[in-house]
Image: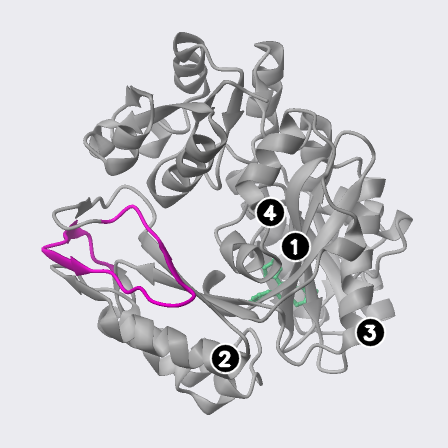
Amino acid sequence: MFKRILVANRGEIALRVIRACREMGIETVAIFSEADRGAQYLELADEAYCVGPARSADSYLKIDRVISAAEIGNVQAIHPGYGFLSENAHFNEVCRSCNIDFIGPSPEAMRRLGDKNEARGLAREAQVPTVPGSEGLIADERQAVSVAHEIGFPVLIKASAGGGGRGMRVALNDLALKSAVQQAQAEAEAAFGDASIYLEKYIEHPRHIEVQIIADHHGNAVHLWERDCTMQRRHQKVIEESPGAHLDAQVRKNICESAVRLIKTAGYTNAGTVEFIVDRRGNFYFIEVNARIQVEHPVTEMVTGIDLIKAQLRVAAGEPLPWRQDEIAVSGVALECRINAEDPARNFQPSPGKIERLIVPGGFGVRFDSHAHMGYTVSPNYDSMIGKLIVHQPTRADAIRSMQRALSELRIEGIKTTVPRLLDILSHSAFVDGQVDTTFIERTWPVGG
Ligand code: MV4
């Protein structure tokens, strides 16, 4: 096992990784920007180095500075967390060339799956259902129209280098499609430095189901069942749960087994997530792979009893997976609410500032993963998530009640948070009945969603 690793992240995920390392007897080196000086996770790490000014682009995203901290800190491996450099295949390669283990997939697997068009090809090869659409990339308007006539409108143009909803465009007819193709290519070139686009049938009112997988370096791969992340606003997840409510048992098994086939075909190692959209009839389609630990990993941890960060560290150190697929069972239901420093009354405008008072809920089956504390100042430089409230209960109804109780105990004063909107969702009959799709929030609270 590693003796010492660098945590190339900040906030709650840095804290989460440092805590797992402490329990495993692994020393940690933390990094911070000038805006994060004095943060709690830095005290819990064994060492900490400043990597630059507040702006992410000048600190957490600066590969040379992060690698310098790793060299000075004399670490064997880097845990990238989520966001920042976590899915940067170049950074992953630099780690390899510096003889530092990257706690995640190989640069090759990361690059293959990071290209959404290539990932689609791998899915077809693995006999995983993909959305009807173009065979490969779309070169021009003429080809786009021809594919659209085969599959039927509406169609969705996606950027191959995009993901997470970035660079997508719906077209309802020939004329709209023709003008959208060139715009989409130009936008993709500007945003990702890669103009590649492909076409899919637009699946209306889908549910978002994602499968947690983990693979070792000995050819073993398992899934840890699914999460339902349908409750989103503008591609930002709001509430996540596991298992998926009302997911047919056979569909569920098929989706999870598809995810494992795909990552085996891709030669993927470590933890990852395979995203699917599921239509009203239970048809499911592969969308993309997230080659990192995700924000919502705790709901899977609660229902499976498996610590995913520890599993990542063990796999990266070369240990074989300690469980067979039939040993991974789901018990009860877990819900996660993301607590953001945003004002629901002002179109979710960020609400940075000092937390004057904080009371954290507790009790049976309640977990609060957060780097926030009384006196902590939420910086405007980073994403607005200040914590994740997770509950685990025997049934979904119990979990909802528990989450309502825990949220009502949570007191955060000095800044605005999304807690009131979370309570609105939890008491909405469509959520309680599990009858929502990805457009629920925007439809239910139309003024800015
Ligand atoms: C889609 C889709 C409908 N049809 N693809 C958005 C995020 C990215 N991972 C894929 N996304 C979608 N892809 C086809 N062919 C609808 C979405 C989508 C969505 C998916 C999951 C969760 C929320 C969403 C919100 C809007 C659109």
* Residues at circles 4 and 1 in contact by the CB criterion of under 8 Å: yes
Q: Quadrant of ligand 1?
A: bottom right
**Is residue 68 or residue 219 the one in the foreground?**
219
Chain part drawn in magenta: 350-372
Residue 389: give x, y in percent of width and height.
37, 62
Of the 4 image quadrants, the one containing the C terminus is: bottom left
Of mark 4 and mark 2, the one earlier in the sequence is 4
Amino acid on which disc 1 is placed: Lys
Disc on res. 158: 1
Question: Residue beneath label 2, please?
Answer: 440
Q: 10 Å neighbourhood of mark 3: few (<14), some, or many (≥20)? A: few
Of mark 3 and mark 1, the one earlier in the sequence is 1
Of mark 2 and mark 1, the one earlier in the sequence is 1
Residue 413: give x, y in percent of width and height.
13, 62
Secondary structure of the residue carrying tag 3 is helix
* Residues at circles 2 and 3 in contact by the CB criterion of under 8 Å: no
Q: Quadrant of residue 193?
A: top right
Amino acid on which disc 2 is placed: Phe
Q: Is residue 184 visible?
A: yes
Residue 379: give x, y in percent of width and height.
22, 44
Say whether mark 1 is within 8 Å of ligand 1. Answer: yes
Residue drawn 38% across the image and 29% down it:
60
Question: Residue beneath label 3, please?
Answer: 250
Amino acid on which disc 4 is placed: Gly
Q: Is residue 269 magenta?
A: no
Which one is closest to the eye, mark 4 or mark 2? Answer: 2
**Is residue 314 or residue 12 the one in the foreground?**
314
Disc on res. 162: 4
State the separation of the CA atoms marked 4 and 2: 24 Å
